[in-house]
Image (cartoon, rainbow, N blue to C red):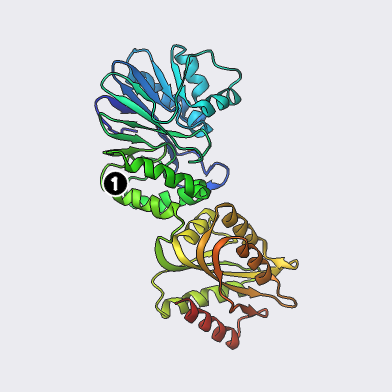
Amino acid sequence: MNVTISDTIKYIGVDDLTLDIFEGQYEVEEGISYNSYLILDEKTCLLDTVDARGTQEWENNLEEALAGRKLDYLVIHHMEPDHAGSLGRLLELHPEVTLVGNAKTFQMVPQFLDKEPTQEKLTVKENDTLSLGEHTLTFLMAPMVHWPEVMVSYESKEKLLFSADGFGTFGALSVRGLDDWACEARRYYFNIVGKYGAPVQTLLKKAAALDIAAICPLHGPILRENLPYYIGLYDTWSKYEPENKGVFVAYASIHGNTAEAAQLLAEQLKEAGVEKVAISDLTRDDMSEAIEDAFRYDRMVLCASSYDGGVFLPMENFLVKLTAKAYQNRKVALVENGSWAPSAARKMTEYLAAMKNVEVLEDVVTIRSTVKEETKEALKRLAGELV
Ligand code: FEO
């Protein structure tokens, strides 16, 4: 993949178009990129390796860019295998390299290798610098964005922020450019980093003190233009503030009756003038898209069948995931269906009550098996409350 940064900083990452599920959970129909960068100065410095799935192509890119030079440093911003998965191969190729990481990085390194590497280690902490000649890296710790050892670095000559997973997106670079960056960046953020809003806020405050010309993440495109837009979205997301006014309707239906109610409600919400209505079938749509939409909008309606004295399991799974990702600061309405002893609303309320600052509307719509005139009226009243 041909990505230009500058004459002296080369992109040597790879696209992975063969992977269907990233990290065992997230569909990546457009693939994903594992970004890796090489600084060519008096010293040569590699910034992260790539997933083992891309080792061979990346190795070719690295050697071509080095053009016979030795490798002086490898900066390890993040030890997760999608970035450190080629570390073992790098140490075989360039035993002369000095590894640069923080104390937590070096605790993890041997966990992912067969043995403790024999290479020299340079342990850095907050605001330490590494001079490469004309280029200088300053290291900023970013614990829990999204692992504890994560750090980012700022290169002061070209004003580049190497942001680790921060500002990353799904999508291979050869498939997805900057168009509608937010769509896949938002899905990536809330599903992967979403739990760690406070650490992201800490990192954003550090970044605010820097003069940044471009952000170079470990996944997805390099961000050069309109940086306040990207940083502003990260600020909104990490504060758990809604990005847009709108209602997300999520439903889990066994025989289609709850689905009918959810679709009817979505139409009523549109007719009532709600700015944006998104809807998802939790039994078949991509769960990570549903998580994304739950965080994107300021209101949500959960519509679910009762099941085994609780709530239908696709909805319970959704609520478990929302809990794990620290869903908060939203207004939620409930629609339940039950043919003999409706139990879905009680169970959904238990989950929501444990979340921070989630207001559950008292007016719960209970369907007895199928949608009737009285159901339509009740849904209409609910839509009115949500406008
Ligand atoms: Fe892209 Fe947390 O790894």
The answer to which image quadrant residue 116 occupies is top right
Residue drawn at the location 28% of the way across and 30% of the way down? 156
Q: Quarter of the image holding residue 371?
A: bottom right
* Relative vertical location of residue 220 with respect to residue 36 in this rendering, above or below: below
State the residue at coordinates (63%, 57%).
317
Pick the front one: 79 or 220? 79
Image quarter (top left, top right, bottom left or bottom right) of the C terminus: bottom left
Q: Is residue 61 visible?
A: no
Lateral position of residue 164 relative to residue 43, left or right = right
Is 84 on the left-hand or right-hand side of 223?
Answer: right
Q: Secondary structure at mark 1?
A: helix
Q: Position of residue 146 (x, y in %)?
A: 50, 40
Residue under numbered circle 1: 227
* Kind of residue at disc 1: Leu
Q: How far across and down, in percent of the image, does residue 53 sit?
A: 50, 31
Nearest the viewer among 61 and 320 is 320
Query: From the Cβ of disc 1, is ligand 1 less than 8 Å away?
Result: no
Q: Is residue 23 above or below residue 355?
A: above
Quarter of the image with the N terminus in it? top left
Q: Residues within 10 Å of mark 1 (few under 14, many from 20)?
A: few
- Residue 179 is left or right of residue 23, and the answer is left
The x, y position of residue 204, in whole percent, is 38, 44
Whether residue 256 is visible, yes or no, is yes
Q: Residue at x 30, y 34 (%)?
A: 160
How many numbered circles does the render carry? 1
Q: What residue do we see at 34% from left, 18% from top?
A: 44
Point out residue 19 in the picture as x, y percentages from the top left corner: 51, 40
